Image (cartoon, rainbow, N blue to C red):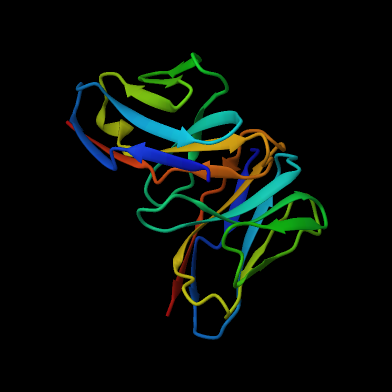
Amino acid sequence: EDQVTQSPEALRLQEGESSSLNCSYTVSGLRGLFWYRQDPGKGPEFLFTLYSAGEEKEKERLKATLTKKESFLHITAPKPEDSATYLCAVLVFYNNNDMRFGAGTRLTVKP
Amino acid sequence: DGGITQSPKYLFRKEGQNVTLSCEQNLNHDAMYWYRQDPGQGLRLIYYSQIVNDFQKGDIAEGYSVSREKKESFPLTVTSAQKNPTAFYLCASSIPRNTIYFGEGSWLTVV
């Protein structure tokens, strides 16, 4: 069964304290791995898509990387406005219309 | 502006009542989706549609119904058969087998 597991469930950082969020997956035939940011009471906002092991994408203080079994979302020198829940999702080749989502990591950045 | 519009933002359902959540997109996407989000859980797929007049059940379709009469619209009805409907509902759309984009969500509460 396809599984997507995110860790930690919650992470508290001081402003400027870099860290990483993890998304591990067990699927057959990964078509793409997606990262989203979700603010409370809002819909998820798309951040990155990664397609193959070794690929990296960057946006401001965020960098996403992908291996054959997991993805990391690295946050460099975070600011309070980076506080949100970060969701990871996978799309597999044999199921074209369904992404499997992890439960998310709730990030809090204190000033 | 291109995007996905969900309405209403907040909805209250009485026991035994059917309610309908609206979703409209102007992104010209063929595929549309409904997800349910509960605290501490990943997004779960209720229904999806790849094309007008066609839709498929997701993992938790019981107690829900949808229609896809127009490309732009994919309303979700929460029927009285859904015994635990209180949740955050997210509509999404995509080019098939590609990144999914979300609306702002609708809160449904049973009163």
Q: Quadrant of residue B73?
A: bottom right
Residue lying at 59% horizontally and 36% vertically, measured from the top left: A91
Residue A104 position (above or below residue A13): below
* Nearest the eye: A28 or B4: A28
Q: Position of residue B102 (x, y in %)?
A: 56, 44
Q: Position of residue A78 (x, y in %)?
A: 27, 24
Q: Quadrant of the N terminus of chain B?
A: top right
Residue lying at 52% horizontally and 43% vertically, measured from the top left: A2
Side of A106 where B106 appears, left or right: right
> Residue most toward the bottom?
B16
Side of B69 where B23 appears, left or right: left
Q: Position of residue B92 (x, y in %)?
A: 61, 47
Residue lying at 32% horizontally and 31% vertically, measured from the top left: A82
Q: Quadrant of residue A90?
A: top right
* Nearest the eye: A43 or B49: B49
Q: Position of residue A19 (x, y in %)?
A: 26, 24
Q: Quadrant of the C terminus of chain B?
A: bottom left
Residue lying at 20% horizontally and 21% vertically, measured from the top left: A16
* Nearest the eye: B28 or B50: B50
Side of A25 where B27 appears, left or right: right
Side of B105 where B1 appears, left or right: right
Total marks in image: 0
